[in-house]
Amino acid sequence: MTKEQEEKYLNEHLTYEIDMLGFSHQMLFQVAQEIGKFSPSNSQISVFTPDDVVSAFFRRNIFIEAFILHARCLVEFFYHDRKKHPDDARAGDFIRDKDWSKVRSELDGPLLKLMGRSGKEIAHLTYSRIDGIEPEKAWDDPNILKELIITIDKFIDAIGQKSSNLKELYAAIKRLKAS
């Protein structure tokens, strides 16, 4: 790829993944606040119908799944060096003068857990899914987001392009940090 093709790819596709991660995280937060209104301690609880409660929980799951899907996509881009398919994009494809695997952090903590759980609980119907309700099934979305922001910042430093041609990507990163 030429530098222009790389910039176009990053501006369109990496920007999309970052924006979707941030938006789904914002929506997840909003739905969590809405679900909090269904607490028995809320004096207005009687105005909610069972359909309101069910709808909020389904919307929460939609945004959890969207957040996890886009987080998983970004983890694969930043942390998987080997490609399953020749057209898979990897962060190392865009770095010329450094070994990306030595620049980025190790895949551990919430991102490693995300990769294991997302395959078993989101991407595939398995017997390994966690039964029950919160807190056993809770996703560590704040720390997943935090770790991905750190990784994205390292990637931007590693590609060494403080180019105005990447303005869409830089704007997406700014939006993500504000989410």
Image (spheres, rainbow, N blue to C red):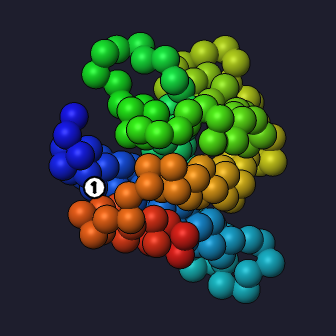
Give the residue displayed 35% in from the left and 24% down from the top. Answer: 88
Q: Secondary structure at mark 1?
A: helix
The amino acid type of the residue labelled 1 equals: Asn
Q: Is residue 34 above or below residue 166?
A: below
Residue 163: name its quadrant: bottom left
- Quarter of the image with the N terminus is top left
Question: Considering depth in this image, is 116 or 126 the residue closer to the camera?
Answer: 116
- In the picture, measured across the screen, residue 166 lies left or right of residue 8, that is right
Residue at left 71%, top 54%? 143
Q: Residue 58, how many percent across, how many down?
A: 50, 51
Side of 176 relative to 171 (left or right): right
Q: Residue 57, located in which quarter of the rendered image? A: bottom right
Q: Is residue 2 visible?
A: yes
Say which of 66 and 176 sits in front. Answer: 176
- Within-10-Å neighbours for mark 1: few <14, some 14–19, many 20+: some
The quarter of the picture where residue 126 lies is top right
Above or below: residue 167 compared with residue 60: below
Residue 80, position as x, y percentages in the image: 53, 26
At 31% across and 15% down in the image, what residue appears? 86
- Inspect this view and state whether residue 52 appears: no
Percent of width and height locating residue 20 = 40, 55
Instruction: Look at the picture and state if 124 lies above or below 31.
Output: above
Q: Which residue is mark 1?
A: 11
